[in-house]
Image: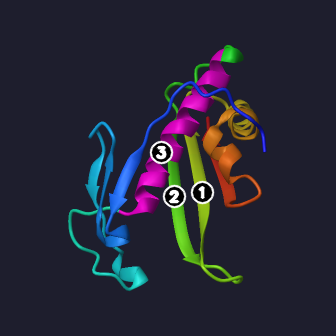
């Protein structure tokens, strides 16, 4: 495992598991949780799931990594839209696992350039991509001009 030089730390606390509540230490994130109906839960209205939170975090992080890589290569990827879809389901080995699809769209950049930027962001920069590598199936779809 690679060591890191820590520059920021945050925390959140959850109570009640998937049918409870989660809150960040600063209160900026405060959400009620509910197991979706598709997973046999109540799917209560106005609630979210850990997968929703992971998807939002990964999309935002990857978007930032893409923008950073673009600036390094003198390309403007700041208008790219990154959509992260997170799926959960039972694993063959037991327990549950995740699968991720990242969709990167930017009509202002040629397909080949956007593909290259997304590849570099995924392989070299995004910490979510590093954390999921060799553990979660991550597929990337790129739609450029």
Marks 2 and 3 close (CB-CB < 8 Å)? no
> Residue at (62%, 37%) from the top-left corner?
144
Can residue 106 be seen from the camera position used here?
no
| Relative height, residue 87 to residue 30 (above, below) | below
Q: Which mark is residue 57?
A: 3
Residue 131 location (% of width, % of height): 67, 48
Q: Earlier in the sequence, mark 2 or mark 3?
A: 3
How many marks overall? Answer: 3
Q: How is the image coloured?
A: rainbow
**Residue 101 circle label:** 1
Q: Nearer the viewer, residue 124 or 118?
A: 124
Secondary structure state at the residue bearing disc 1: strand
**Structural distance between the alpha carbons of marks 2 and 3:** 11 Å
Q: Residue at x 44, y 37 (%)?
A: 10
Callout in the foreground (2, 3): 3
Determine which of the numbered discs, if any, sits on residue 17 in the image: none
For the C terminus, the quadrant is top right
Dots 1, 2 in contact, CB < 8 A:
yes
In the rendering, at what x and y percent does residue 94 appear?
65, 83
Name the spot of residue 85 as percent of width and height, x first: 51, 58
- The image quadrant where one finds the N terminus is top right
Query: Which of the 4 quarters of the picture holds residue 75?
Result: top right
Horizontal side of 112 relative to 83 (left or right) equals: right
Residue tagged 2:
85
Crowd band around label 2 with a 10 angstrom C-alpha radius: few (<14), some (14–19), many (20+):
some
Horizontal relation, residue 145 to residue 23: left or right? right
Local packing at callout 1 (Cα closer than 10 Å; few below 14, some 14-19, many 20+) is some
Does the magenta-highlighted stretch encompass residue 133? no
- Residue 101 in view here: yes
How far apart are labels 1 and 2 at the CA level? 5 Å
């Amino acid at each position: 495992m690679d060591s890191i030089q820590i520059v920021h730390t945050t925390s959140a606390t959850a109570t009640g598991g998937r049918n409870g509540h989660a809150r960040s230490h600063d209160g900026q994130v405060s959400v009620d949780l509910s197991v979706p109906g598709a997973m046999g839960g109540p799917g209560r209205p106005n609630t979210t799931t850990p997968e929703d939170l992971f998807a939002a975090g990964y999309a935002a992080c990857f978007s930032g990594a893409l923008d950073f890589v673009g600036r390094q290569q003198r390309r403007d990827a700041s208008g790219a839209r990154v959509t992260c879809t997170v799926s959960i389901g039972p694993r063959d080995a037991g327990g549950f696992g995740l699968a991720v699809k990242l969709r990167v769209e930017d009509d202002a950049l040629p397909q080949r350039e956007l593909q290259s930027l997304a590849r570099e962001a995924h392989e070299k920069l995004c910490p979510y991509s590093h954390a999921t590598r060799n553990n979660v199936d991550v597929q990337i779809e790129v739609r450029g001009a």
